[in-house]
Each structure stands twice: as structure tokens, then as C-alpha cells.
Image (cartoon, rainbow, N blue to C red):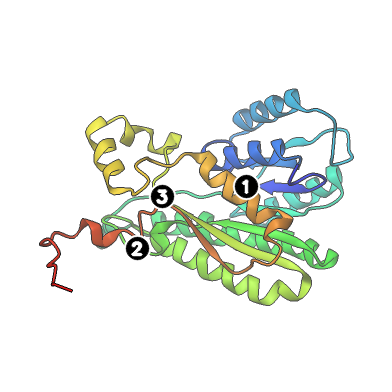
Amino acid sequence: MRLGKKVAIVTGSTRGIGEAVARVFHREGAAVVVSGRDEAAGKAIVEDLLATEQGNPAGGSLRAVFIKADVSNHEEVVRLKDETLAVFGTIDILVNNAGVNAPYPMETLPMNAWNKVMDIDLKGTLLCSQIVGAEMIKRRSGAIINNASISGRYAYPDGGAYGPAKAAVIMLTKQCAMEWSQYGIRVNSISPGLIHTPLTENIYQDEDLLHRREEMIPLGRIGRPEDIAFAAVFLASDEAGYITGQDLLVDGGLTDSVFQHIPGRAAIKEPM
């Protein structure tokens, strides 16, 4: 198991990408703290994980718990850290996955929508990194993985605060990586491309839209939450022990294929 004897907190893990990360981490041997604001969903995931356990590589009486927390609230993040330590005694991995979106054109973007996205996507990532990172600094080891987005690299219509927040997450990742490498802490981010999650279900019910999006992706399909989870396992594992400060694109090749979508004439073949 690639994460055996590791303890991981995964924020925003009651559905979608976060849930997939929690499940794959648990399958790879980690003790997992499922965290979010949906208590019923979180507890159901934990019950499911506990039902699959075979032994306990983390050394305690269980390898999955749910801890409710709003990552934009300092006191709740402190409680998340304290309760994790009370149950498992240590924290090896932090996955900052919690995030929201509020699509608006910039000229009508209300400040409450801007503040909500920034509070959860950016401030929440910083708070969790600071509070959990302080424990990692004491131990002089740890891995932090931030969920960014291709929207942090490329603007899109009616993106509102989401793109700016994710762009800041990418730079926050690099800043923390640079400052905390002296403590043996690695900090990286993942930028997912188009991923089919409960939040995007309404989009992909439109078969024509689904087909047109798939045609744009070199690998020919929309991503799954597990695609991001497998990348997170690698970055959290000792196999990535020499990687820090990086933003990993997991997008099926979408963002690097822009020129194939630009209309143009056929290549002129000159005689050799």
C-alpha cells in the first residue's frame, strides 16, 4: 500500500473529487479524515470505508472518521486539526480540496459571491495549510496537495471569482513550497480539467454538449474524480519525494491542445 501508516485530512470530501481522494487514499492504506459541511454524507462515506477495512496500517482502532468543518472559519479548522490529532496522533498529508464556484460576468459580479469563493477556495486553503502545516513543521515532514484548476491558468466566460482564486492557489502552493521545504514539507497542487462530478452532472446530461467537449480533449473523454485521486496519491506518496512547488495538469491534454482548435489551412509541403 502506497500510503500505509499515513494519516490524511481531505477537506471538501463529502462528494465529487474530494470523496474520490478520500476513498483512494483509504484503499492505499491511509487513515483518512473525511471533512466537509455535509455531515450525513460524510458519515455515510466513513461507514462505507470502515466496512471495507482489512487490518489497520495506521495503528489505531479505525482508519476513517468524519469531522465537520468550514475551512473558511479559523476556529473550525483548529478543531479539525485538534480532533485529527486526538484520534490518530499525527497528520502526514493534507489535501485542500474544499471549494465552491459562483459563475458571473465580471461587470455584475456581486461582492458576496466574490467573498464566498475567495473565503473557501483561497482563504480556506491558506488557513488549513497554516494550521495543519504548523504541526508538520514540528515533525519536519509532511505533504500538502492543493486542488487548483485549469481555470487558474486560463480565463473563461462568466468565470467570476473562481479563476482568480485558483490562480492564487497555484501561487500560494509555490510560496508555501519554497518557505517550508526547509522543514521537509512538500507542497504541490493539481489542476483538474473537465471532470464529471455531481456539480457538473447537469452539463453532461446534454449529450451534444458532452460530445463536443469530448472532441476537444486529446484523450477523447471527460475526466473522472478518480483521475484526480490517483494523481493525489502519487503526490502524497514517497514516490514524489523530490517534487515540490509544482502544479500538475490533469486534463487529458486539453490545455496544451489550443492550436488544434484554431481554424487554418492545410500545411504547405515544401520539396525537400
Residue 257 against residue 70 in the figure, above or below: below
What residue do we see at 26% from left, 58% from top? 108
Judge depth for marks 1 and 3 and give the one in front.
3
Q: Which residue is mark 3?
A: 252
Q: Secondary structure at mark 1?
A: loop
Residue type, mark 3 in image:
Gly
Question: Element type at marker 3?
Answer: loop
Placement of 130 over or under 33, stated as above or below: below
Compared across the picture, whether 217 is left or right of 43 comes to: left
Q: Nearer the viewer, residue 131 or 157?
A: 157
Q: In this orientation, which residue lies closer to the viewer: 43 or 37?
A: 43
The location of residue 186, given as percent across then percent down, is: 69, 65
Residue 181 in the image: state x and y as whole percent.
Answer: 71, 73
Asked whether 68 or 231 is in front, the reply is 231
Pointer 2: what residue? 154
Taking the view exactly as shown, the residue that stands out farthest to the front is 272
At x 29% / y 36%, what residue is drawn?
Answer: 210
Considering only order in the chain, which callout, 3 or 1, is on the residue closer to the N terminus? 1
- Which residue, given by chain and number where applicable, does mark 1 sit on? 11
Question: Which of disc 1 and disc 2 is earlier in sequence?
Answer: 1
Callout in the foreground (2, 3): 3
Tell me if residue 17 can be seen.
yes
Quarter of the rendering occupied by the C terminus = bottom left
Please state which amino acid type lies under the numbered disc 2. Answer: Tyr
Query: Residue 220, how many percent across, how many down?
Result: 34, 42
Determine the residue located farthest toward the top in the rendered image: 51
Specify the amino acid type for callout 1: Thr
Tell me which residue sits at (60%, 74%) in the image. Answer: 175
